């Protein structure tokens, strides 16, 4: 603990650098990113393909170690922790949705969600309740007994999200959770994320989808492994009300 | 065309025909080129509004011609144009003008322009989200909103492309 900062941010990255080895060449993916995420924030990370979004998210979740730089969780230095310690941290504090939609292929949708909760030490009954609630929130109840192989891409992603949320994590890291979703499922997922955010979950959401990004309170734009912009999303002015006629408001906004 | 001419004059003072060449070099075949008459009409309006100043230069054996320079008021006007987020039906055209013309003036840089425009789009998107929530159940409104959402998404994707190519 440093005396200078009474409440450290939930996550503080300082000058993170990370390259990937591809054959014999090093590909720089994150080239010096400093980022501070306070408890309760909802941050979207956007940027073109290859900008380093997934790499950054993996660094923040301890799934990759930085080549250089520091990462602090709750003020505590974590970038040098061993895998076992990271695994413990993640189980206790993190929910993570990977871009690939990580599911256990030999288990049903329901078990995929429930097992995650049981592994984190939740009682059988609570785990079942939470699983059911999430299946309904994400319009997946009819797929409860299906295996991952029987799901569409968008359904897999929603199950992965349910797995990440079932423990009510302090921090949710989600990589393109709406990537394969149609408009209505996107709306469901965003509504769910907003609800968890309102209940205090800190969220880092990697997304290409502007609707998803604008649901966050803050948007970090990555470009070529660096932060090109970091801005708050502003609440629309009062003129933005349907009382003024939807058509006119939209015109006003371009 | 006012802002295009102001932006060229922000780089350096120029004669009317040099401005015509400047526009041709900057935009090539991408935009229809104004003829010299249109340029002189615009210049004289800009001069009347005090945004530029023309000085007669005497030439031996030929009629005098005017060299134009941007005034302080003109610089302010131009800086305001760069700074304001672009919106309205011709948003892409106008934003693109800013992006291309920013080069060579000290008034704006391309990354800042892109960032500001992205912020503007995201804020607008936030407004559309909110509007969609209040219009739930009204199919006509929702379709209209959806159309605006898709447009904005396209604008943002295009901004990303501009960033990849220009910065
Ligand atoms: N495992 C890996 N091995 C080699 N190179 C990698 C690996 N993972 C990522 N890269 C490279 O690192 C750079 C950043 O990749 P990253 O996956 O972080 O991008 P991204 O922003 O998530 O892109 P996308 O939007 O396509 O998911 C890219 O050039 C990519 O090719
Ligand atoms: Mg990625």
Image: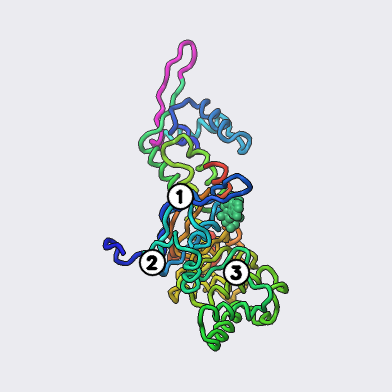
> Could you say which is closer to the camera, residue A129 or residue A191?
A129
* Pointer 3 or 2: first along the chain: 2
**Would you call the spot at circle 2 few (<14 residues within 10 Å), some (14-19), or many (20 or more)?**
some
Secondary structure, mark 1, is strand
Q: Nearer the viewer, residue A13 or B74?
A: A13
- Rendered location of residue A16, percent (x, y): 45, 53
Left or right? Give the position of A142 relative to A174.
right
Q: Are the residues under marks 1 and 2 on the same chain?
A: yes
What residue is disc 1 on?
A: A32
The magenta span reads B48-64
Element class at badge 3: helix
Residue designated by label 2: A74
Q: CA distance from mark 3 to mark 1?
A: 32 Å
Ligand 2 falls in which quarter?
A: bottom right
Whole-Å distance between the Cαs marked 1 and 2?
21 Å
Q: Chain of mark 3?
A: A
Write down the residue under mark 3.
A186
Q: How many marks?
A: 3
Residue drawn at x 54%, y 46% as measured from the top left: B163
Q: Quadrant of residue A139?
A: bottom right
Overall secondary structure of the magenta section: strand
């Amino acid at each position: 603990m440093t005396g200078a900062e009474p409440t450290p941010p939930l996550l503080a990255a300082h000058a993170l650098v990370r390259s990937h080895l591809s054959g014999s060449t090093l590909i720089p993916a994150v080239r010096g990113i400093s980022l501070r995420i306070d408890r309760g924030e909802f941050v979207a990370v956007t940027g073109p393909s290859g900008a380093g979004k997934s790499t950054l998210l993996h660094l923040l979740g301890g799934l990759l170690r930085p080549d250089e730089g520091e990462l602090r969780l709750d003020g505590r230095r974590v970038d040098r922790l061993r895998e076992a310690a990271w695994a413990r941290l993640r189980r206790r504090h993190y929910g993570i949705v990977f871009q690939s939609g990580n599911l256990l292929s030999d288990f049903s949708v329901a078990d995929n969600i429930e097992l995650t909760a049981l592994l984190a030490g939740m009682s059988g009954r609570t785990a079942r309740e939470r699983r059911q609630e999430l299946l309904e929130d994400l319009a997946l109840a009819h797929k409860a007994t299906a295996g991952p192989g029987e799901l569409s891409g968008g359904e897999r992603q929603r199950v992965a999200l349910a797995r990440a949320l079932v423990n009510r994590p302090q921090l949710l890291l989600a990589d393109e959770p709406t990537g394969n979703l149609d408009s209505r499922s996107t709306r469901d997922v965003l509504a769910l994320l907003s609800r968890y955010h309102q209940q205090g979950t800190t969220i880092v959401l990697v997304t290409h989808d502007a609707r998803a990004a604008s649901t966050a309170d803050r948007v970090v734009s990555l470009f070529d492994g660096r932060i090109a912009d970091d801005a708050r999303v502003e609440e629309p002015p009062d003129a933005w009300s349907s009382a003024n006629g939807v058509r006119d408001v939209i015109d006003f906004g371009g | 065309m006012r802002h295009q001419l102001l932006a060229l004059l922000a780089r350096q003072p120029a004669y009317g025909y040099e401005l015509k060449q400047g526009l041709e070099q900057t935009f090539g075949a991408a935009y229809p080129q104004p003829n010299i008459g249109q340029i002189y009409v615009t210049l004289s309006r800009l001069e009347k509004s005090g945004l530029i100043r023309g000085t007669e230069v005497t030439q031996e054996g030929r009629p005098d011609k005017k060299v134009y320079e941007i005034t302080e008021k003109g610089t302010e006007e131009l800086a305001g144009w760069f700074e304001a987020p672009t919106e309205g039906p011709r948003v892409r055209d106008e934003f693109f003008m800013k992006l291309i013309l920013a080069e060579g003036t000290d008034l704006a840089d391309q990354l800042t322009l892109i960032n500001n425009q992205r912020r503007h789009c995201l804020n607008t998107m936030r407004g559309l989200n909110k509007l969609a929530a209040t219009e739930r159940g009204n199919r006509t409104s929702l379709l209209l909103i959806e159309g605006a959402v898709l447009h904005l998404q396209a604008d943002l994707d295009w901004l990303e492309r501009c960033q990849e190519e220009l910065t």
